[in-house]
């Protein structure tokens, strides 16, 4: 974790109590994610986790671990239903069983993005971002 991120976390924690942040509780924060993810983020702050390995262990899901790694600048590709649709070349609803995938398929798609990225000489997460923004534009998502 960079010193910059550590300093932000320290300042954030110093400004908060154990169960509140500036007098607000977990339930007072409105965020665009599932409550489970919100609770995990809160627990990371409360437990003062700053090591990437500790945080990744707490997150423990394929996509969320990859997403965290992308934010941290680690060489990882985040695979989701959109990435699966892109790989297949057809659009399926994200709530459809057709966009669910297991660990093996998730890993296979990550490997495919890495191979494709090497061919076009970009980082895998950059290729994923390019394909996603193109897919989004083409399908008006």
Image: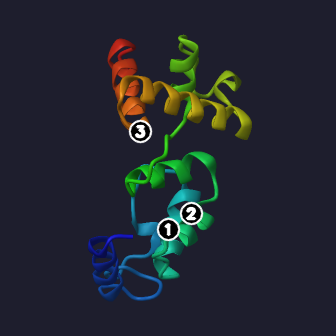
The residue depicted at 59 percent of the width and 58 percent of the height is: 36
- Circles 1 and 2: CB atoms closer than 8 Å: yes
Precedes in sequence: disc 2 or disc 3: 2
Q: Residues within 10 Å of mark 2 (few under 14, many from 20)?
A: some
- Locate residue 16: give its quadrant: bottom left
Residue indicated by mark 1? 52
The residue lying toward the viewer, choosing from 16 and 11, is: 11
Precedes in sequence: disc 3 or disc 1: 1
- Circles 3 and 1: CB atoms closer than 8 Å: no
- Looking at the rendered structure, the secondary structure element under dot 3 is helix
Q: Position of residue 127 (x, y in %)?
A: 39, 30
The residue depicted at 42 percent of the width and 31 percent of the height is: 128
- Circles 2 and 3: CB atoms closer than 8 Å: no
**Location of residue 34 with respect to 105 vertically, above or below:** below
The residue lying toward the viewer, choosing from 39 and 60, is: 60
Residue indicated by mark 3? 125
Q: Residues within 10 Å of mark 1 (few under 14, many from 20)?
A: few
């Amino acid at each position: 974790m960079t010193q910059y991120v550590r300093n932000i976390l320290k300042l954030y924690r110093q400004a908060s109590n154990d169960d509140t942040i500036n007098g607000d509780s977990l339930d007072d924060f409105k965020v665009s994610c599932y409550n489970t993810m919100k609770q995990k983020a809160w627990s990371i702050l409360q437990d003062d986790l700053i090591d990437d390995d500790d945080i990744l262990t707490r997150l423990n899901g394929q996509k969320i671990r990859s997403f965290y790694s992308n934010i941290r600048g680690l060489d990882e590709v985040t695979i989701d239903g959109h990435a699966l649709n892109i790989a297949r070349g057809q659009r399926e609803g994200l709530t459809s069983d057709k966009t669910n995938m297991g660990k093996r398929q998730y890993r296979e798609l990550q490997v495919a993005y890495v191979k494709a990225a090497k061919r076009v000489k970009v980082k895998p997460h950059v290729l994923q971002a390019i394909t996603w923004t193109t897919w989004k534009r083409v399908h008006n998502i």
